[in-house]
Image (tube, grey):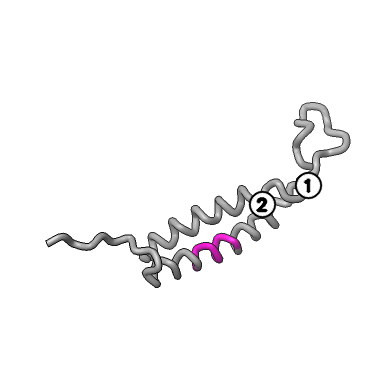
Amino acid sequence: MSIAGAVVVYVLCWWFCFFLALPFGARPMEHPELGHAESAPANPRLKLKALIASIGGLVMTIVIWQIIESDLISFYQPQKS
């Protein structure tokens, strides 16, 4: 896998993990202020969720890289003669 390919895979895995982590621990405010959505989380903890997504994205990228490099799944078609 090339460096550009690894970056693309990492970015996709990061967003996947980030969207998976968003709902965890989200609790709505007990008394929302006027003009705020009632379903908005009181403490979204986005930095923690971004860290979790970074670690998860790295792990997923390494696993995908290992699968590609080991030829467990081949992405190349044999040449017909």
47, 27: nearer the viewer: 27
Mark 1 residue element = loop
Q: Distance between the residues labelled 1 and 2?
A: 14 Å
Tell whether 71 sits left or right of 33: left
Which residue extends farthest right? 31
Q: Which mark is residue 65?
A: none
Tell whether 11 sits left or right of 44: left
Q: Residue at x 67, y 48 (%)?
A: 22
Magenta-drawn stretch contains 61: yes
47, 15: nearer the viewer: 15
Q: Residue at x 38, y 64 (%)?
A: 73
Looking at the rendered image, the quarter that the C terminus falls into is bottom left
Q: Which mark is residue 21?
A: 2
Which residue extends farthest top? 35
Q: What residue type is labelled 2?
A: Ala
Q: Mark 1 points at which residue?
A: 43
Predominant secondary structure in magenta?
Answer: helix
Q: Give residue 65's position: percent from left, percent from top.
A: 44, 67
Magenta-drawn stretch contains 53: no
Residues drawn in magenta: 56-62
Q: Give residue 23's position: percent from left, percent from top.
A: 70, 46
Q: Give residue 3's position: percent from left, percent from top.
A: 39, 65
Mark 2 residue element = helix
